[in-house]
Image: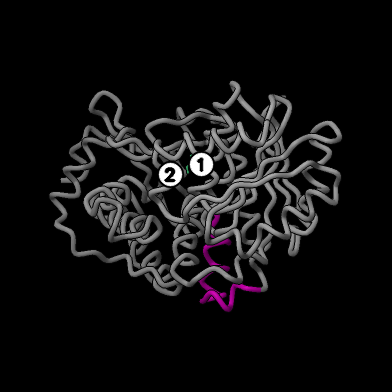
Amino acid sequence: MITLTVGLGERSYDIVCGRGLLSNAGDIVAPLGRAGRKVFVLTDSDVAPLWLGKTVASLRAAGLDVSSGTLPAGEKTKRFDSLMAVYSMFADAGLTRSDLVVTLGGGVIGDLGGFAAATYLRGLDFVQIPTTLLAQVDSAVGGKVAVDLPWGKNLAGAFWQPRAVVVDPDVLDTLPDDYFSDGMAEVIKYGCIRDRDLFARLDEAGSREGLRVHIEEIVMRCCDIKRVVVERDERDTGERMLLNFGHTYGHALEKYYNYEKISHGAAVAVGMRTICSIAERKGLTAKGCADKITALCNKYGLSCRDDAPYDEVVGAIASDKKNLNGALNVVLLRDVGDGYVYPTDGGFWL
Ligand code: GLY
């Protein structure tokens, strides 16, 4: 078992990772509050048949009073409209301010359940149990919770740190290949921005199968990179932007396709290649980075290619919420393993 502590003063918490840890989730959750505390587990219709029973059994065995609710699986569940269903589940379960929410699922459940926890009764404690690779290495760590509004993704949100993150790599065994690839884009991103050894290890492992025996360490290496960044810039006013390497073009591509044709990870992979190619031409990134990233992404089922018209995708970047007063910071690599934030005036993409 590997434990990392995210050091945020009184909001510090542990990320605990170990194979089979789901069966011991109760031992991690129970000490976080008083005995007999109510716990509400929020999950989705894909995850419930696989992991809800085991999770609830472990929480009950630790003496907790557990109830649960299941939402339809899929991105649409992250809409603001779903919140009422979640609040109504919390009310039916009789949750009070001293009770706790557990989010068992991928990024949709973690973000939505975390936002509901942040806002119900002015804030309930919550614990993230991420069940996708993407959620384990990214969305479950760092306290960003949000729902989508009709005008855009993640527009209503909060910084609300979990009390713990419980990571069981065994749950990844049932993850379909395309979901695994989706998470690998973020894993590769961490290698790109902060860790050339990680990048090299991923290259050496060469495939999902090759990575299997190392997955626990790889997931925790990613969490540790994110931990350091979040500790320095919890509120995303500077260094945390590094985590958005490949995401500016990637988000614009997702938006171009109305969040339907391309997955987040596939779009980020295209974004990482695109921004490196541009920066190489401008002499801001070492030559050959875009090719190295593309070759690694290809090994993990990410093509880094897309046919969307470049000019139209770049047009959408202007409306990205991370633009401040017309200026746009982008994340570049000096070389693999060495990311930096580069301020532009918007002309960068032309
Ligand atoms: N997923 C980017 C962040 O947590 O800041």
Question: Which of these two is toward me, 160 or 116?
Answer: 116
Residue bounds of the magenta highlight: 195-212
- Please tell me which residue lies in front, 131 or 321: 131
Q: Is residue 73 left or right of residue 137?
A: left
Using a 10 Å C-alpha cutoff, classify the residue at mark 2 as few (fewer than 14 neighbours), some (14 to 19) or many (20 or more).
many
Q: Label 1, secondary structure: give it.
A: helix
Residue on which the image places disc 1: 111
Horizontal and vertical percent for residue 292? 39, 67
193 versus 328 height, above or below: below
Residue 279 seen by the camera? no
What's the colour scheme? one colour
Residue 297, position as x, y percentages in the image:
41, 68
**Res. 61 mark:** none
Q: Nearer the viewer, mark 1 or mark 2?
A: 2
**Residue 133 occupies quadrant:** bottom right
Tell me where residue 324 sits by quadrant. top left
Q: Quadrant of the N terminus?
A: bottom right
- Residues at circles 1 and 2 in contact by the CB criterion of under 8 Å: yes
Q: How many marks?
A: 2
Q: Amino acid at mark 1?
A: Asp
Considering only order in the chain, which callout, 2 or 1, is on the residue closer to the N terminus?
2
The residue at the far front in this view is 92
Is the magenta region chiefly helix, strand or loop? helix
Residue sitting at x 27%, y 66%: 305
